[in-house]
Amino acid sequence: MSHFFSEDIEKSIEKYREYIILYRNEMDICMQNWELFEEFQKNSDLFNKILGKTTAIHSFNTIQYSLIQITWLGLMKLWDDDNQHNNNVRFRLLYTFINSKNYLEFMKNRYEDYPDVIVNFNKNKKEFKKLYNKYFNGKYNHIYKELKNIRNKMLAHADMDNRPTYTHSMDELREFYADSIRMIETAYALFNVGINLEERRKIVRRNANRFVAVMKGLETSSEG
């Protein structure tokens, strides 16, 4: 039985275990904004009924737009391109590391007596790569490109000559968001850490739903 050990790769793995906490934090901000936006959209008739005949509707629309802006920005932080000048949160950094020869050799040798660990590792690595390539190189690449364009030309800068447009649907954006959540879960698994962001998402959505319930209560009291 061989014992492959590299202090450098051990230190790198520990460093990435710390990094992925920042990925989770960015995703949590996305969740807080997207789930509330979705709940607002789902109950748009209610808000229009309560606020539609008052100038308060303008503030409500501003809140909705802010929610989708923060969602766009958060997703594009996670999907940002490589930048040699910044060590910023981005899936590309994880993608490169988990496919590096040193990391693969380390995992193979460290867990050679634990085939179930290697099976799970390969399963999660395959899923992470598949989801990454789905948007970065695959047929859904237009979503990534369009959000990048929105971020660069509208959110980070106000381009006066070439305003961004997009063709992706809300369903496609919803899938992009859900796949991004799953990528962080698989990234955690690749560094032997368990996390369930779906449970967190449910809590955030429940909180958003309770906000809407308060608004429904206001509607009922005003009718009474």
Image (tube, grey):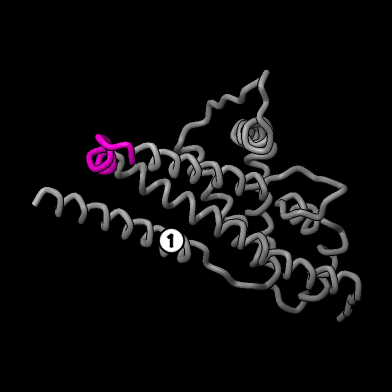
Identity of the residue furthest to the front in this view: 55
From what the image shows, is residue 203 above or below residue 167?
Answer: below
Q: Is residue 81 left or right of residue 175?
A: right
Tell me the residue at 72%/55% (across/down).
89
From what the image shows, is residue 2 above or below residue 202?
Answer: below
Q: Is residue 140 visible?
A: no
From what the image shows, is residue 116 above or below residue 152?
Answer: below
Q: Amino acid at mark 1?
A: Val
Identity of the residue furthest to the top in this view: 161
Image x and y of residue 76, in percent: 65, 44
The span shown in magenta is 45-56
Report which residue position mark 1 lands on: 204
Image x and y of residue 102, in percent: 87, 63
88 within the magenta span: no
Tell me the residue at 8%/52% (across/down).
224
Q: Is residue 152 visible?
A: yes
